[in-house]
Image (cartoon, rainbow, N blue to C red):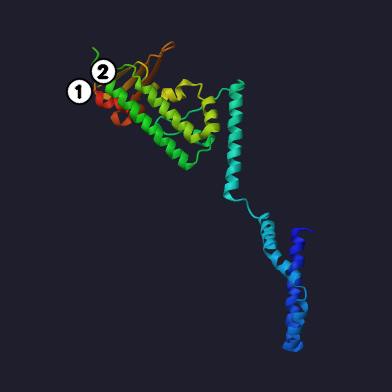
Amino acid sequence: MSPRARIVIFSGIVVALCIGTYWLGHERGLADAFASKAATVEKPQEVSRLQAEIPQLKNERTALDSDNRPEDGTAANARANAAAMDRLHTFVEFQQEHLATISLPIINGNSKLAAGFTDLFNLTPSETATLQQAIDQARQQTDQIMATNAGVSRNADGSVLISVPPVAAGSSIRDGLMDAFAQILGPDRNKAFLALQSTDRRDSLDNMFSEFGTQQRTITLTRQTSPRGTVSGYTLQDEVRIPDGENSTLAIGFVDASTINPRFRWVIPLVPQDF
């Protein structure tokens, strides 16, 4: 017999007993009612069995009712995570089978996690905040070691030359940041993260962190003047010497110190005041 049928039958028995007791008490008097009650309890074992079944029937009713309830947040979140992992695995497969070239920007120009990255890896608000803290710390450490080891000189044309030698400590900063990604993403998502490292060097984590100060770089600052001879802005050229590879050169413009790309804010305190 199904749980729902047992519940209906048991409920009917209880209702019938209540109606019978009410009728006996009013139509035949209390004495007859007590006599009838004594007669109905001639099988105490049966009554005990029915009473013992009440908790079980209640549990079965609760289970049946839950079948029609909306899915709770935990189950919905688990399914969403599964869908996100399926999507990640698809991208990884495309990358590894050379079916597509995946460009995965991790942080934007302001050193903030890219919205596309947080969506693709289904990061929770807590995970996003924790990972952003690790990125901010790595940025601060990288800027500090480059500024500390930089040499400043002036060219004949008045431009400022900032030379930064390779700093071995940058490798530890990179390792710490990658460990933070691994810890926050977990094994499965981190495996996908490593497999989907951007093939476009401009979007790579190493490039966005100026190679963590581990490579020789030369930064040249040049003033831009208007026809009237007033300073209208500045140009920053960043050349990175990549061992066993082509040098990388990036040129950006900015109006003043407040508008420089955040990646190069560490340069401002090094610039001579008469520049």
Does residue 115 appear in this view? no
Residue 168 lies, in percent from the top left, at 35, 19
Residue found farthest to the left: 274
The disc, 1 or 2, on the residue closer to the chain's N-terminal end is: 2
Vertical order, 14 against 129 (above or below): below
Vertical order, 64 against 135 (above or below): below
Residue 80 lies, in percent from the top left, at 59, 41
Task: Look at the image and tell me in which quarter the C terminus lies.
Answer: top left
Number of numbered discs visible in the structure rendering: 2
> Given the image, on which type of amino acid does mark 1 rest?
Asp
Task: Look at the image and tell me in which quarter the N terminus lies.
Answer: bottom right
Q: Is residue 261 left or right of residue 55?
A: left
Give the number of the disc on residue 274: 1
Q: Is residue 1 left or right of residue 232?
A: right
Give the number of the disc on residue 247: none
Please, what secondary structure does the residue beneath circle 2 have?
A: strand
- Mark 2 neighbour class, 10 Å CA radius: few under 14, some 14 to 19, many 20 or more: some
Q: Quadrant of residue 24?
A: bottom right
Q: Residue at x 77, y 82 (%)?
A: 36
> Given the image, on which type of amino acid does mark 2 rest?
Gly
Does residue 231 appear in this view? yes
Q: Quadrant of residue 82?
A: top right
Residue found farthest to the right: 1
Vertical order, 153 against 10 (above or below): above
Residue 221 lies, in percent from the top left, at 29, 20
Q: Circle 2 is placed at which residue position?
A: 151
Q: Quadrant of residue 26?
A: bottom right
- Mark 1 neighbour class, 10 Å CA radius: few under 14, some 14 to 19, many 20 or more: few
Q: Residue at x 34, y 17 (%)?
A: 166
